[in-house]
Image (cartoon, rainbow, N blue to C red):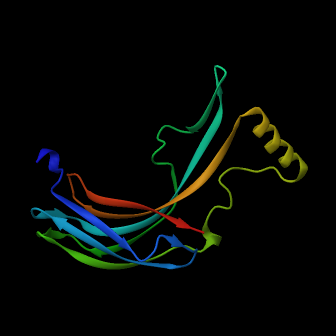
Amino acid sequence: MVFGFFEGSIELQLDKTNLAFGETLHGKLNLKLKKEKKARQLRVTIKAVKAVTQYGKRSGVRVMGQPVGSNSNQGEVVFSTDAILDGEKTYLPPGGEYEFRIQVPQKSVMPQSGLPELAGNLGKAVQVAQMLSGFGMSAQIKWFVEGVLDIPGGVDISKRLQVSVQ
């Protein structure tokens, strides 16, 4: 295969996708391999990524959802933790199924806000001005669960699912 593509896949089965802070996520990772793979580890990660979006006008045309920064797909990782399912070894076809449990952090360890905020009447006035002018910024934290077979010097086999944490 070209550059190792389609040599395997990962399926993630989560007991639920709407989570609460402090909750433990239960799931299964199903590793499917077409040929043996030497890998550093098999892991599941839960991470929170902050995406800051700027909106405004360009040449009189309203533009929404322009990402701030060079890589809009990555964002800034504000929380990440791993559950190691298996260590360094040669993984054999057809693969296997691994159960996992991974802890969602307490809300107290998360950043309080994506953007600095002005308090009181001044803060409300700035928000109203941004809405009326069509310019401003917003921040959103997106949560992901990702399963990865970490292959040294090669293309990792991975699967990523978005979840909701409230």
Q: Position of residue 151 (x, y in %)?
A: 22, 59
Residue located 79% across and 36% down the image: 132
Q: Foreground: 102 or 15?
A: 15
- In the rendered view, tell whether residue 99 sits above or below residue 113: below
**Residue 71's spot in the image, x, y percent?**
46, 41
Q: Can you give x and y, in whole percent of width and height, for residue 106 in the image?
A: 59, 74
What quarter of the picture does the C terminus occupy?
A: bottom right
Q: Say whether residue 54 is left or right of residue 149.
A: right
Relative to 137, say whether 86 is above or below: below
- In percent of the image, x 17 and y 53: which residue is there? 6
In the image, taking residue 7 as reference, residue 127 lies left or right, namely: right
Viewer-side residue, 1 vs 40: 1
Q: Residue at x 46, y 48 (%)?
A: 74
Q: Residue at x 53, y 39 (%)?
A: 69
Could you tell whether 46 is left or right of 117 in the image?
Answer: left
Compared to 149, does 102 lie above or below? below
Q: Position of residue 134 (x, y in %)?
A: 72, 34
In the rendered picture of this protein, how many numbered marks are placed on residues? 0
99 to the left or right of 115: left
Of the pair 22 and 131, the residue shown nearer to us: 131
Q: Residue furthest top?
A: 59
- Residue 129 vs 143, above or below: the answer is above
